[in-house]
Amino acid sequence: MEEYTFSQGKKMRCGYTTGSCAAAAAKAAAQMLLSGRRVDAVELDTPKGIRLHLETREVEFTPDYAVCAIQKDSGDDPDDTNGILIYARVEKTDAPEHLLEGGKGVGRVTKPGLACAVGGPAINPVPRKMILQSLSGAAAQYGYSGSLKAVISAPAGVEIAPKTFNPRLGIEGGISILGTSGIVEPMSDTALIETMYTEINVQAGKGNKDLLVFFGNYGEDFTRDNLMVDIDNAVTCSNFVGELLDYAVYKGFETLLLIGHSGKLVKLAQGVMNTHSKYADCRTELFALQALFNGASLEVGKKIYAALTTDEVIKILKAENLFDKVMPAVTEKIDYYMQHRVHGKLKTGALMFSNVYGILGKTAHADELIKLHQMKRKDEDNAR
């Protein structure tokens, strides 16, 4: 498709979602079943208002059923599902309404908290609506008053699924059929935030009231190796701390412990709630300011300001005997801004670490929340 967006100063080609592929395949298969004629291309109006013109593949039709596939195109987005085939098999049914099922490579939901029913296929609400509308549209087009059943499959999804978030979300055996707009916008913050919300929903669905959060793999690895807490129920926030805190309050969580590398977590001490470098980078400025407040010379402050990494900053602070003064000041500000964001409705804690220096600092409630998660791990180990 020839739709573009701009991200990080680059012109990037958009793609279309697995949901759009499934809906288009269902539309073409239904048309072939009801018309008895081959359909080599199909048009689909997406929720975003963009009309797609898609070629069908792997076409097969008989008087009893029709099957075809649409190839997923993620545009310039780095997506594990790019290029796979999404199939729809459509047949007539005596059911009072159109039916939708998941076939090979479409995951099954095993945990509550998602937008799909436990035990059902991982086909999200918007794609589900699009697929059923495709069936209704084809039935109306050819004057068919009965019902149709569509089975959506993605055989390559079996192999791809372990690379996605699905195992963490309790979706087994395949990929999810996703998409709220029908269009993939490369490097979209919205998609990442929605993934985070989904992870939080899973924890809420389990009845969990205490969130353990990492920015990404660094935090998960550090926690696994050093803190003896249960990381299986953790969520990942990427750069979106503000959205994380807002949603945790909205979902009624009682505590939230954020464990992060100094390069990201220190930004919270300036009230920066999106830690991506394209939005703000105040790491060395913050450390330099706090060092000056705590007795550093101007020369040392300039050296800290010029540092390229937070590990280099920590090295300077330790060499100048400033570390034990500066880090409590930094974590105090982190605590302040986290509490300011949640308006006191959620007990928050944060632990800052470095891969070189280990634990650097903790906010006021961090130790309490770490112990809470350690006890949860012990309880789960004892229950096994």
Image: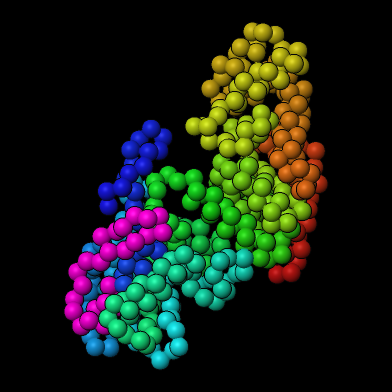
Magenta-span inclusion, residue 29: yes
Res. 211 in view: no
Single out the residue that lies furthest toward the bottom. Answer: 94
Measuring 59% from the left and 25% from the top, which residue is drawn there?
A: 282
Residue 187 on image: x %, y %: 42, 44
Residue 83 on image: x %, y %: 30, 58
Q: Is residue 115 left or right of residue 225?
A: left
Residue 379: image quadrant is bottom right
In this view, the residue in front, 373 or 4, is 4
Res. 72 in view: yes
Measuring 41% from the left and 35% from the top, which residue is drawn there?
A: 8
Magenta range is 28-53
Q: Report the coloring of the rendering.
A: rainbow
- Identify whether 185 is placed above or below 170: above
Q: Is residue 149 left or right of residue 283?
A: left
Residue 234 on image: x %, y %: 64, 54
> In the picture, which quadrant includes the C terminus?
bottom right
Measuring 44% from the left and 84% from the top, which residue is drawn there?
A: 97
Magenta-span inclusion, residue 138: no
Q: Is residue 134 left or right of residue 296?
A: left
- Identify whether 293 is placed above or below 62: above
In this view, the residue in front, 201 or 137, is 137
Residue 283: image quadrant is top right
In this view, the residue in front, 197 or 319, is 197
Q: Is residue 91 left or right of residue 359?
A: left
- Identify whether 362 is placed above or below 192: above
Residue 330 on image: x %, y %: 72, 28
Measuring 51% from the left and 58% from the top, which residue is drawn there?
A: 165
